[in-house]
Amino acid sequence: MRTISKTLLVAAAVAIPGVTLADNPAWTYGELGYVRADAGNDSTDAFHVELSMGIADMFHIQGQFTDGDVRGFSATEDVDFDGYEVVFGVHPSIGANTDAVASFKFFDYSYNDLPSGPTTSYDVDADGMGFGVGLRHMLVPNVELNTMAWWNEGEHDFNGFQQDEDFTDIELEFGGRYLFTDNFSAGVRVVTNDAVLFGDSATIDVRYQFGQDFF
């Protein structure tokens, strides 16, 4: 996590002068990211694909699919998982370079073949919804800083292995983005929460921004 924080500071410090970009952050884009997460003795590696559409300079719709594996549940095998999130929100401009953000999300993740003994395993589904607020700010024309705070609520469905469990968690996101051109950028994001199956994570991504909102 210390390395990621240093990367954010370096990105802000070495911003290339003379690149002319939109004043406020872009909301219409496609993104590919790599995620590394830790929860207790378990570690997760995953890739995600995200699509986002900005509408009327105020609204956004986003969809994300994630696929990866978890190590630590079993001494011999990784645990595969996949899932998706769908986000609906608003992002009113509160300044020439800053958007406030308020979003609802729905999520559904499936963890397959978690070991419960030498020869037995079970599946877990984690689904629910969340509400988040935050800011996206263009520090300089080609460096963005962003933050979100999420409150999530859902259910772990153990598919008959044991009784289902409700859960809630608070998730905090801190990130930065470096824009090489009007359309191409790279970003880093650190997420901290107390989720049982995912935990704290760091994400590195590349993004292609399609320009202004479609409508």
Image (tube, helix red, strand yellow):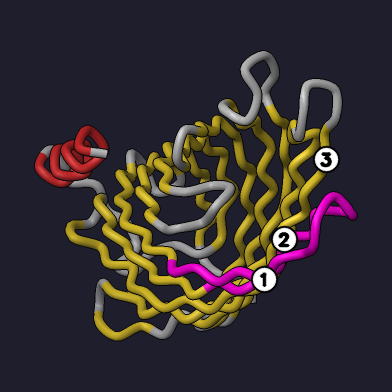
Residue beneath label 3, please?
A: 122
- In this rendering, the count of numbered labels is 3
Residue 156: assigned label: 2
How dense is the environment of label 1, judged by Cα within 10 Å: few (below 14), some, or many (20 and up)? Answer: few
SS of the residue under disc 1: strand
Gap between marks 1 and 2 measured at Cα: 6 Å
Q: Quadrant of residue 145?
A: bottom left
Badge 1 or badge 2: first in the primary sequence: 2
Question: Which span of residues is magenta-colored?
Answer: 152-170
Residue beneath label 1, please?
A: 166
Q: Does residue 186 show up magenta in the picture?
A: no
On the image, the x and y values in percent for residue 144 come to 28, 56
Q: Nearer the viewer, residue 54 or 109?
A: 109
Residue 89: assigned label: none
Gap between marks 2 and 3 measured at Cα: 12 Å
Which residue is drawn at the image coordinates 21% and 43% (left, top)?
A: 5
On the image, the x and y values in percent for residue 59 come to 56, 80
Q: Quadrant of residue 141?
A: bottom left
SS of the residue under disc 3: strand
